[in-house]
Image (tube, helix red, strand yellow):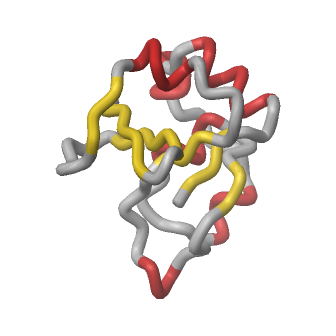
Amino acid sequence: MFYYKLNNKTLISRHLLELEKISEDYAKKDSGTIYFLNRLEPLKSRRTYCISDPDLLWITEEKLSLLLRSQCNDSNDLPVWMSDKIKQNKLASV
């Protein structure tokens, strides 16, 4: 994952972007909401939402099956501090 700072907000992305990079250590010290950048189709998805489950970080489209809990293994690789942000409702997808 890549970590960025933009307008005093911490951003996380799975993709390399042309933004101000920061370290993971710097990102995890942010006590506010952190924004996870997604690549969902803007006309077919919510603009922003609170990440309530780690599996929501890996979706490629929003559809009815989101109501069913998936068995995604990628969430097991999530850093503890990011899991804590999810539990605190301080990780939002944009």
The answer to whether residue 50 is left or right of residue 39 is right
- Using the rendered view, name the quadrant where residue 53 is placed: top right
Residue 31: image location, x then y, percent: 69, 28
Of the 4 image quadrants, the one containing the N terminus is top left
Residue 89: image location, x then y, percent: 78, 40
Q: Is residue 71 above or below residue 68?
A: above
Q: Which residue is at the front of the view, 71 or 16?
A: 16
The answer to whether residue 79 is left or right of residue 48 is left
Residue farthest to the right?
Answer: 88
Look at 41% across and 49% down and name the residue there.
6
Residue 3: image location, x then y, percent: 37, 33
Look at 59% across and 34% down and name the residue there.
71
Q: Is residue 9 above or below residue 66?
A: above
Residue 49: image location, x then y, percent: 67, 60
Q: How many marks?
A: 0
Look at 32% across and 40% down and name the residue there.
14
- Using the rendered view, name the quadrant where residue 12 is placed: top left
